[in-house]
Image: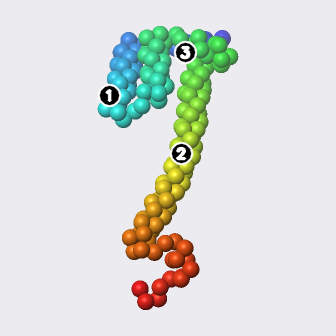
Amino acid sequence: MIPTVLAAQADKVSLTAQTRIIAAALAILFMLLILDLIRRDRLQERYSVIWFVAGLAMLAGAAFPGLLGLVADLMGVRDTNVALFSIVLLLLLGLALNFSVIMSRQAAQITRLAQERAMERAHEQAARDDLERRLNGTTRAEDTATGPNPDA
């Protein structure tokens, strides 16, 4: 009988008023930090949505502690700690995958930009060489027919 009572108490989420206030204050501070990072152009708006939703979820968890028990029931998990850990783990895995996709896309863009810049430099150098030849009075055909000038 005692293990059944302990199991029933373990499933119930109980937070003191002080803990709920602290959790809500931390969630609000977190969301204010996100807004400040956006304001200072340290975080782009498209990435801030994910973090702002996480802050809202923290605020909802602080305001409604029974919500985690409901989520645990929906997940089919008896322990709310396991449910919370699973949710956070899935969130972090999703963020890691999202940022890996972003990094891959940016690496491809950097490679493409470096190749375009190298081609621009080659065209600029060819234009400079052509201009220099014209100023010296030689043409490209004369330059290739005579070969390099050993006296120069």
Q: Which mark is residue 109?
A: 2
User: Type of residue at label 1?
Assistant: Arg
Q: Is residue 125 shown above or below 33?
A: below
Residue at disc 2, secondary structure: helix
Instruction: Name the element at disc 1.
Output: helix
* Mark sitting on residue 39: 1
Residue 100's place in the image compared with 21, above or below, is below
Which label lies toward us, 2 or 1? 2
Rendered residue at 41%/86% (across/down): 152
**Residue on which disc 3 sits:** 68
Q: Disc 3 vs disc 2: which is toward the camera?
A: 2
Q: Residue furthest right?
A: 76
**Picture layout, residue 114 above or below residue 54:** below
Q: Secondary structure at mark 3?
A: helix
What residue do we see at 43% from left, 11% from top? Answer: 63
Q: In the rendered structure, which disc, 3 or 2, sits on the residue that comes first in sequence?
A: 3
The mark nearer the N terminus, 3 or 1, is: 1
